[in-house]
Image (cartoon, rainbow, N blue to C red):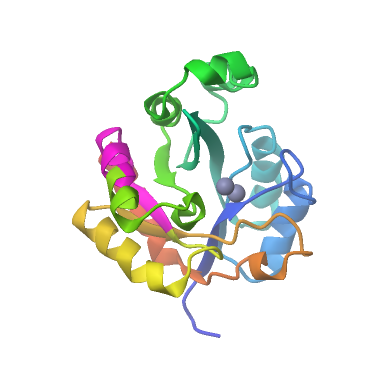
Amino acid sequence: MSNNKRIDLHTHTSASDGVLRPSELVNKAMEEGLSAIAITDHDTVKGIAEAVEASDKIGLELIPGIELTCREGYREYHILGYFIDYKSEKLIESLKSIRSWKVKETMSIKDYMAMITEAGGLPVLAHPAEYGLSNADLEAIIKELKSYGLVGVEVMHPSTPSHLEEVLKDIASRYNLIVTGGSDFHTDMHRSYTLGIMNVDYEVLSQLKTARLSL
Ligand SMILES: [Zn+2]
Ligand SMILES: [Zn+2]
């Protein structure tokens, strides 16, 4: 193993559809030798408080996050939000309201991006390979999201085929976006989604922190 500190910026707990409680996930990350993790449950921040408490106890760095499911027309995109203010009442209200499909129908991807940025979060496009888009369409959506405040693209993800990796890194560099990554860990049953499997370097987190300072 290298001396580089490893992190995982995409994990799920039992607050959404993961199997581990937030505190269990934090302890597991520590056991696996990770330096930091982001908890990014689907459309909820309910697991964050417990994770923060557990990580404070053992000295693991925890980034409060979320993964929003954004429907626009017949398309669905997932947007990660890092360093989100999980105590924000406005955010908590918005998360409640999008449980209604009637509300969801009226929301644009720009609205979802605003939910993250208004709560102080850094929006990142999750697992770009999963949308079945051509390279040109991928670039178009990334360009659009960038105009709403996108800061990064999750290139390092178990779903990214190697041929797409360079394409995405090229798009990210042209739009001045951070290349991020994570395992999308839900359970140990899915071996290619094992916690920490993407070997993301701590440097990625440093870049996100720098981006945060310039908000
Ligand atoms: Zn997702
Ligand atoms: Zn996910």
Q: Residue farthest to the bottom?
A: 1
- Count the marks: 0
For image coordinates 62% across by 38% down, the residue present is 42
Q: Is residue 117 left or right of residue 64?
A: left
Q: Is residue 188 visible?
A: yes
Residue 98 screen position, x and y as percent: 59, 20
Q: Is residue 165 left or right of residue 140?
A: right
Quadrant for the C terminus, please: top left
Q: Is residue 148 left or right of residue 156?
A: left
Q: In this view of the protein, which residue sits in the foreground, 70 or 18?
A: 70
Magenta region includes residue 151 = yes
Q: In this view of the protein, which residue sits in the foreground, 90 or 31?
A: 90
For image coordinates 68% across by 44% down, the residue present is 51
Residue 118 screen position, x and y as percent: 40, 25
Q: Is residue 89 visible?
A: no
Name the image quarter holding residue 145. top left
Quadrant for the N terminus, please: bottom right
Magenta region includes residue 155 = no
For image coordinates 23% across by 60% down, the residue present is 173
Above-or-below relation of 175 to 72 = below
Residue 69 screen position, x and y as percent: 55, 35
Q: In this view of the protein, which residue sits in the foreground, 45 or 99?
A: 99
Q: Is residue 214 left or right of residue 115?
A: left
For image coordinates 67% across by 62% down, the residue present is 29
Tell me the magenta residue range: 141-154
Above-or-below relation of 89 to 133 = above
Residue 90 screen position, x and y as percent: 51, 16
